[in-house]
Structure formats: C-alpha cells, structure tokens
Amino acid sequence: MTTRTLISPAQLGRPHARYVYWTVLALVLVLFTVVFLGPLYWMVTGGLKSTQEVVQSPPTLVPGSLHPETYSRAWEVMDLARLLFNTLYYAFGALAFQLVLDVAAAYSLSRLRPVFGRAILGMMLATLMIPATVLVVPQYLTVLDVPIVERNLLNSPWAIWLPSVTNAFNIFLLKRFFDSIPRELLDAASIDGASRVRTLWSVVLPISRPVLGVVSIFAVVGVWKDFLWPMLTLPDPTKQTLNVGIYSLASGVPENVLIAALTIASVPTLLIFLVFQRNIMSGLTAGGLKG
Amino acid sequence: MSAPTLSTSEQPEARIRRASGSRPRATSREAFLRALRHHLSAHSFLIGAVLCFSFFSWYPMVREFLLAFQKTEDGRTTWAGWDNLRTVFADPAFWQAWRGTLLFTGLALVLGFAVPFVVALVINEFRHAQAYLRLLVYLPVMLPPVASVLLFKYLYDPGYGLFNSILDTLHLPQQQWLQDPDTAMLSVVIAATWMNMGGATLIYLAALQAVPGELYEAAELDGAGLLRKIWHVTVPQTRLILSLMLLMQIIATMQVFTEPFLLTNGAGPEGSTTTVVYLIYQYAFNFNDYGAAAALGLVLLVLLAGFSAAYVRLSRTADDA
C-alpha cells in the first residue's frame, strides 16, 4: 500500500480520472524536461555549432552542421586540462583533510568526551550562525599572512584545503552518527585491547559508511561549485579552478568555444551526481532539517 | 524497561576496570594521571580541526570586529572608532546595495520559496516517474556556477538569445533582460532559482511524504476541496520545515554574490543589481578599504543575527520532535 496524498485513491480509480492523471503526468514530464534538461541540451548542442550559427538569430534548435572540433579547441585554448586537474587536486585534497580531521574531531567529541569538549563543539557550531560572506575579508587577510607561522598561502592549495576543514555542519553530522553507535560495540573493541585509533578505524568507520559517503560527496561538490574564495586566493592563472579560469577567459574566446568549455566543466559533477544520486538525495534530506 | 538496559551498559565498564587490572580504590594520583592521559589522547584527535577553526574561523571572527573599528594607512593600523561605519552609511552605494539585496531577497522568496513547494506538491501526487522528476529538478544544482550562469547569459542575450526568440514566436515584445535596469534583477533571480531550487524541492518532498494520509481522508469527509486540503492539512503539517526553509533562504539570499557578479559584473545596468556583499567585495578588493568592508559586513551580520538565532531555535525544536 502506498501512502496516500492530496488526491484520494478512490478519485483516481474512476476511469475518467485516470485519463486526466496520465494527461497531467505527460504534461508535467514534458514541462520539467524542457525547463531542467532544455538548457543542458542547449549547452551541449551550442558547443557543436559553428561560430556563425551560435550567434545567429533566430537560433537553431538542431545544429545545422556539426563541429565537434569546437570541443577540442575549447580544451586547448582554455587549457581545460590544467583547470580540470587543479579543480580535482583541490577537491580531493579538501576531501582528504575533511575526512581525517573532521572525523577525528567528531569521534573525540562524541566518544572520548575530552574536557572542554562541549565548549569546543559549541564554538564550532557558533560559526554556523555567522554569515559566511562576512568572514571572507578577514579570512582573506589571514591567508595573506597566517599568524604565528607567518606564511602567505596565496596561490597555494592550502588556502583551499585548510579552511574547508572548518565545516561545523560536517562535524555535527558525523558526531550525531557516532553518538548513535551502540556503546556495547565499542566496549567490546576496547576489551579486546584495541587502541582508540584502531577502534575508530575498524569498528566506527565501517559502520559509518553512509554518513562518510554523504560528507565526501558534499566536500567534493563544494569545492567544485565554489567561486568567490578560489577567485580571491588563487590569482595565478595556472593555479585556478574551472569556475575562475573559465570566467576570466570567457570574454576572449568565440561563443561556441566558451559553451563547449562550459559543457566540459559540467561533466564531472554531473557524473558524480548520476552515479551517487541515491546517496546525495538521502544525505540532503537527512541533513536538510538540521543546521 | 530502562533498568535492564542501564545495567547492560554499565557492565562492560566494570569489566574493563577489572581487565585493566586497576583496583576499585585507586589512589588519587593514579586516577589523576589516568584522567590526564585520557584527556590528552582525546584532545590529540581534536587538535587538527581545532587549529583549522582557530586560524580560519575563530580568529577571522574576532578580526572582523577589530577591522571594522580600525584604519590601516601606509601599513600603520590605528583605532578608527565609528569612522568606518560613518563612511559606509554616508556612501550612496550603501542604500543602493540594500535596495538591490532586498529586491533580490523579496523576488527570491516569491520565486525560490514558492516554486519549489508547488513543484514538490505536484511531484508528490504522481505514482509514476517520481525518481526521474526528482533527478531533473536536482540536476542544475550539480552544475558549476560558472556553467549555469554563462549559459543563462547566452539564453538572455537580446540579439541571439533563446528567450527572446521564444517571446517572438509567442508574439510577445522582446526584452533586454540583463541590460535593462527594470528587468535585470528579475533575470538574475530567475537564473538563481533555476540553479538552486533542487535542494529545497527534495526537502519539501521528504516532508510531504511524512504527512499522514488519514488527515486528508478526514478533510475529505468534511467536504474539503483540493486547495482547502493544501491550506488546512499540508501547510500546517509541514509548517516546521516551511519555516526553517524560509529562514534559511532569507539568510542565504541576503548574502547573494556569485549570480549577480557573474551575470551582470556585479553592479548591473545603472547599479540595478548591486548587492551588499558585492559592495563589501568592492570596498575590500577594488578600493583596498578593509575597514569599510568589515564595517559593512558587521551591519549585515547584525541584521542576519536575528534570523540565525530563530533558525537555530527552530531546528532544535525540529530535533526534539
């Protein structure tokens, strides 16, 4: 039995209502496909059009002549290989830092309960209340000259990796999950003489796979989607991310080359989404309620 | 019920105590050392994250307050008191940026708040193709912003853009979209809604699926039509999530930067798409006036603090429920 919604099953059972149901469904399917997939179709085919065709008015729905070489031109002219590599390097570096440091912190706060643990957690959660954009300026100044160690992190991947760890929401999500692991399981491990690192590694982490998956996907996608911070901290064109690199080169290349570049830049996150859509959607609704 | 679970959870601890060989009455020195060792090792797990927070979150938070009341000239930092705030308030761009931000927030609430809810209501009614519809709505969220924004720029183009040729085939007047100060902000909001509505839609869908079906049945017995059922059953049942999402959207949209920056280079025609965060960006990175940037940031912070506090209180209620 499916849960019932606004329209009652009895109403839907009537032959006339069935006809209406399928018509409305078909209309909604077409409308949604056009609205959400249409622009993507426009992007992929725009990259296949010739330079004249792409700025022609009225625009053509199907490319008159195919120019797949536009994609290879975009790849070379905008140095997409480098931008793609940079973005991957920043994204997976940020993922590694978040997984190691945030998991360790959440484990400690949830299971080891150090002195001042509650205060530290409170201070971490308090950062969620400060609008992120307000901190961009002082964070930028910190990156220019990190106090105590006195290093300038401009143009270095550390400027992306280290601030990505300060994700209080991740720590909160992980801590809640660790809190829910039965005590007996961890006690059994410590009776067997397992150290804390070992308990974390071979008992806690294997159970936590779903939440680790969600945190990982959002970590990678977060870096992939960020714009302002990498624009400020990575001014060197050879070190830029896809977002920043394409933006700064956008006005210098023909329209069709630019659109082809946008398509290429979109492929990795779309692939991640299509592969992990179940995890992403469940993670979103699990985390959506809590701030 | 609770007594046996309590005893089983205490038992292992007693066993550990015996297993580790310590006598029940350890000397206070031993106990202290053991506690010290425990806390030191617990803190060693925390240290990495705490250092990152210290440098990139907590210190910048303190610094934001200091910067707002300081002036840096020729490398010398002096106390400026309220000067920065006065500068910011006296700037005509201040009011323009607030007008832009409130216009964006207002339009984004009409579109970005209502549209995902209606879309979720519609998707929830179908017994077929739900997975496909959910997938479609979330697809744009996964695009890098530069891709969706530049794509919309191309769709909005007054010469060869798709939107104008659609208007043309419908015999409607063509628009200047991003080039016209009257429509520029609306165009930005439409693009931003398309890019970001997926997350909200999925959260609403999850909330709708938790509405008990018997309530609809009861409403039908009372002779309620579709709209009455939505108003008297769906909305009250999803009120908590609706209010949380409303607060979250206000907080997020008042900080908008990327969309207007990429679509209209920040200011837009006649400054029509200038937002507060764009002005902060300009003070800091175009005029090198970090004091003014921080002061304006502080104004934004104070205004948003109320919404943030309400959000935290409400999400605690949601947690308890």
Image: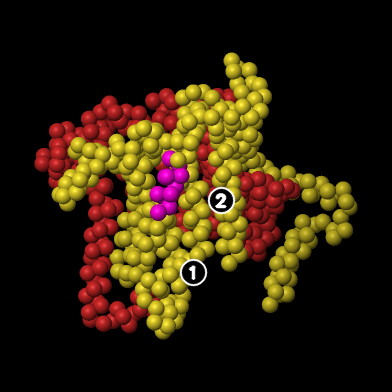
- Range of the magenta residues? B100-110
Q: Chain of mark 1?
A: B
Whether residue A289 is situated above or below residue A25 in the rendered picture: above
Residue A145 lies in quadrant: top right
Taking depth in this image into account, of B151 and B40 the one nearest to the observer is: B151
Chain for mark 2?
A: B
Mark 1 falls on what kind of element? helix
Nearer-the-camera pick, A229 or B31: A229
Q: Main secondary structure of the magenta part?
A: helix
Give the residue type that dot 2 points to: Phe
Label disc, if present, on residue B307 of the rendered structure = 2
Find the residue positioned furthest to the top: B74
Find residue B227 and report its horizontal and vertical position in percent. Answer: 37, 71
Residue linked to disc 1: B236
Residue B312 lies within the magenta run? no
Q: CA distance from mark 1 to mark 2?
A: 21 Å
| Disc nearer the start of the sequence (1/2) | 1
Q: Which amino acid, by three-letter code, is at mark 1?
A: Pro
Task: Find numbered disc 2 in the image and state the secondary structure of the residue it sits on.
Answer: helix
Instruction: Give the image quarter of residue A149.
Output: top right
Tags 1 and 2 on a common chain:
yes
Quarter occupied by the C terminus of chain B: bottom right
* The hue in which chain B appears in the rendered picture of the protein: yellow
Q: Which residue shows up at 81% across the image and 46% down it? A: B33
Total label count?
2
Residue A264 seen: no
